Image: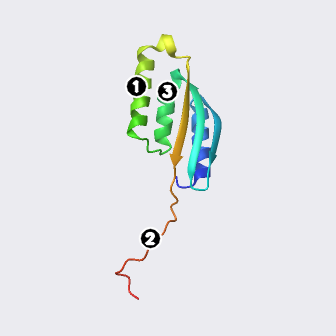
Amino acid sequence: MDEPGRLIQTLTGAILCSGGWVLSRGANDAGMINMLFEFERMHCIDIYTVLIAVGLDLSQLAHLRFTELCQCTRSHHEDCSGEIVSVDLEIYSFPSDTTLPPSSSEGA
């Protein structure tokens, strides 16, 4: 999504529907979105899936951390499933209406 406000609404709804809660959210004029949310570890696969489903392009490090969290939670479900996970998410959105300069092949 190229509109930060719409992405914030979609992501907030998706997190809430997956068992999480949003503590803060916002966007600046440059299109950077900040969102702080939490969820119980037992919902880590749902949250990870939601982040991908809304169209976020996660970094390699983010994928590794979520994979480790999900695998660890699955292996130690009884010990840690009720623990709270906090995520401080930064999203860089880019406007879709950026126009490219005319190419030199376009005649004058």
* Labels 1, 3: front one: 1
Q: Where does label 3 land, which residue?
A: 44
Circle nearer the N terminus (2, 1): 1
Query: Local crowd at mark 2 within 10 Å, few (<14), some, or many (≥20)?
Result: few
Q: In the rendered structure, which disc, 1 or 3, sits on the residue that comes first in sequence?
A: 3
Q: How is the image coloured?
A: rainbow
How far from the left and from the top, in percent, is residue 48?
A: 47, 33
Q: Residue at x 56, y 53 (%)?
A: 31
Q: Provide residue 23's location: percent of width, then percent of height.
A: 65, 34
Q: Earlier in the sequence, mark 2 or mark 3?
A: 3
Name the outermost residue toward the left: 105
Say which of 90 and 8 sits in front.
90
Single out the residue that lies furthest toward the top: 78
- On the rendered structure, is 28 left or right of 53? right
**At 39% from the left edge and 32% from the top edge, which residue is drawn?**
64
Measured Cα–Cα span from mark 2 to mark 1 = 41 Å
Q: Which residue is mark 2?
A: 100
- Is 67 left or right of 51, judged from the image as shown? left
Q: Nearer the viewer, residue 42 or 106?
A: 106
Q: Secondary structure at mark 2?
A: loop
Disc 1 marks a residue whose amino acid type is Glu
Where 98 falls versus 74 (above or below)? below
**Above or below for 82 versus 23:** above
**Label 1 vs label 3: CA separation?**
10 Å
- Quadrant where the C terminus lies? bottom left
How crowded pointer 3 is (Cα within 10 Å; few <14, some 14-19, many 20+) is rated as many
Disc 1: which residue:
68
Spatial distance from mark 2 to mark 3, Cα to Cα? 40 Å
Residue type of the residue flagged with mark 3: Cys
The residue under the point 52% across, 45% down is 91
Q: Which of the two discs, 2 and 3, sits closer to the camera?
A: 2
Image spot of residue 100 (x, y percent): 44, 70
